[in-house]
Amino acid sequence: MSTRYVFLDRDGVINESPAPGEYIRSETKFRLLPNAANWIRLFNALEFLVIVITNQRGVALRLMSEDDLARIHRKMLVELAAKGARIDDVFYCPHAEDSCECRKPKAGLVYAARDKWNIDLAHSLLMGDSDNDEQLAAACGLAFVRVVDGHLA
Ligand SMILES: [Mg+2]
Ligand SMILES: [Zn+2]
């Protein structure tokens, strides 16, 4: 059997969402949702590989740097690891609206992950909290699970 994959949106799935129109700009604002480590440990136990895909337009808007984002993602991985949960890779879009092929619901992040990890999308899953995520899943043939603030919708 080939390896199966789960794509996870970040804000609203793994960590508390920022206020509308806001961004998590520094690791001090990054707070794991209570269920995040549990989901991820379950996927780890099922031997899915876990890949985060996230839009982070705050970089293009110069509200944070890619170094800030790297620090945030390091904190995410470290805090999850402390709870026994492993994320295998992180892909993000730092670009402005309508300026790239990777800002969700465009499929660039999923395709980049597919090409790197040789993913069979038809046997993979996306968990997300937005219509963007649902549209992306439909366009890529991924199963979709809707989450609201870390709870199954
Ligand atoms: Mg989200
Ligand atoms: Zn992009």
Image (tube, rainbow, N blue to C red):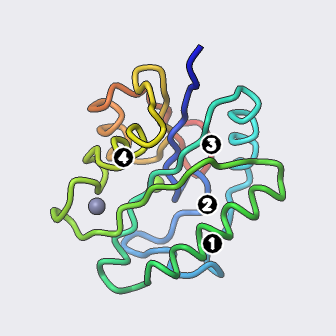
Residue type at numbered disc 4? Ala
Label 3 beta carbon less than 8 Å to ligand 1:
no
Depth-wise, is mark 4 or mark 2 nearer the camera?
A: 4
Q: Secondary structure at mark 3?
A: strand
Residue in view at x 54 percent, y 42 percent = 147
Residue type at numbered disc 1? Phe
Depth-wise, is mark 3 or mark 1 nearer the camera?
A: 1
Q: Is residue 84 left or right of residue 50?
A: right
Outermost residue on the top side: it is: 1
| CA distance separating discs 3 and 1 | 18 Å
Q: Secondary structure at mark 4?
A: helix
Q: Is residue 97 left or right of residue 49?
A: left
Question: Which of the two discs, 1 and 2, labels the residue nearer the N terminus?
Answer: 2
Q: Quadrant of the N terminus?
A: top right
Q: Badge 4: how crowded within 10 Å, few (<14), some, or many (20+)?
A: some
- Kindly identify which residue carries mark 1: 30
Q: Are marks 4 and 2 in contact (CB under 8 Å)?
A: no
Mark sitting on residue 151 = 3
Residue type at numbered disc 2? Asn
| CA distance separating discs 1 and 2 | 7 Å
Mark sitting on residue 112 = 4
